Image (spheres, rainbow, N blue to C red):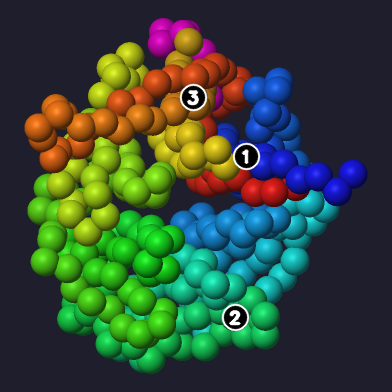
Amino acid sequence: MGFCERYLYVCLHILSEPNPRWFVLHPVQRRLKPIDSYMYQTPASSSFVEMDWGIYIIGGLVNGKPTSDVSLFDCFEHTWFRIPPMKMARASASASLIDDKIYVFGGCGDDADSSNWAEVYDLNTETWDFLSVSTPTLNNKTLNIQQSVVIDKKKEVYVLAEDGQSFSFSPSQCMFVASEKTDDSKPQDRADWCLIGTFIFCRGGTRGKILWCLPYELDWKEVKGLEELQEYDITKLCRDSTGKMVIFWNVNPQPEGPKSVELWSAEISLKKSKVSEASEEWEVWGYIDWSGKLIDTDNVKVLFAGSVFI
């Protein structure tokens, strides 16, 4: 019919099964529909990059070792394609899409040096090249990217290293610039960075908390109005096509009974406002538009969730 809609795709690792499985979240029935994997097995610790109609799965661990393999999941045809492998094997790398190029940083462990720490994939030429960039000071904690997000307005990647130091990478200048701001309060607890509007959102380190900050500031504050979520551990946070936040969490309906788990999800709309008329400070409120159970299963981990056009 020549009409495309956004659908949310989810990759789950049901821990009683050897390999992850892919699902599409039906927008009306609000249930997860399984997708035939066609024998493709998503590696653990992979990086994911969404494009308009597909998802790139980059690197990861195969038999406990990093791999350079890259695959593309065509969400329109539900088929898998092998993509030319990276030049370096990587796991838990930062991967970001800007202007038809995928920039991958880190994930190569002790083999990292200034010549191989970063590489780029050109979607048009289908080739990988190492990035000759001015990298941060070479030490394991600085080179281990904890979180990253693309700042659309500036067309640059904003990253946080394991040691709490933040950097920005501009493809046009092909260099990293260190920020004066650092996150000294357990940056590993600020998971699933997601840019919605002009703010960065993430899962907080304590139960059910969702945090926000302005890019380049790292002054994290809690989203208000979501106190009912604080009895759960949020396991994944992402953005849908409408600018709403989508979160996932597990519920054990019978704590003393069989070890079954319900995977739940919620859609949250966000509203920002000034603290007062005279103030220049912002606050963000969240409103749960929908929440419900998606699937009954064994213990499950959400590896990826993101929306694409189909």
Magenta region, mostly helix, strand or loop? loop
Dot 2 crowding, Cα within 10 Å, few <14, some 14–19, many 20+: some
Horizontal side, residue 189 vs residue 3: left or right: left
Residue at 11% of width from left, 66% of height from top? 180
Looking at the image, is 240 positioned above or below residue 130?
A: above
The image shows residue 301 at horizontal and vertical percentages of: 49, 37
Q: Is residue 169 in view?
A: yes
Total tally of numbered discs in the picture: 3
| Quadrant of the drawing holding the N terminus | top right
Span of residues in magenta: 254-263
Considering the numbered disc 1 on the image, is that residue within a helix, a strand or a loop?
Answer: strand
Secondary structure of residue under mark 3: strand
Please name the amino acid that badge 2 sits on. Asp
Q: Residues within 10 Å of mark 3 (few under 14, many from 20)?
A: many
In the rendered image, the vertical position of residue 30 relative to residue 243, given as above or below: above
Residue at image position (18%, 81%) is 137
* In this picture, residue 101 sits left or right of residue 156: right
Depth order, front residue of 5/63: 5
Between discs 1 and 3, the one toward the N terminus? 1
- Amino acid carrying mark 1 in the image: Leu
Residue identified by numbered label 3: 266
- Residue ranking furthest to the right: 1
Residue 149 percent across, percent down from the top left: 38, 58
Check disc 1 and report the residue beneath it.
Answer: 8
Say whether disc 2 or disc 3 marks the residue closer to the N-terminus.
2
**Residue nearest the viewer, comparing 5 with 107:** 5
* Residue identified by numbered label 2: 122
- 260 part of magenta stretch: yes
Q: Residue 181: percent from the left, percent from the top?
A: 13, 61
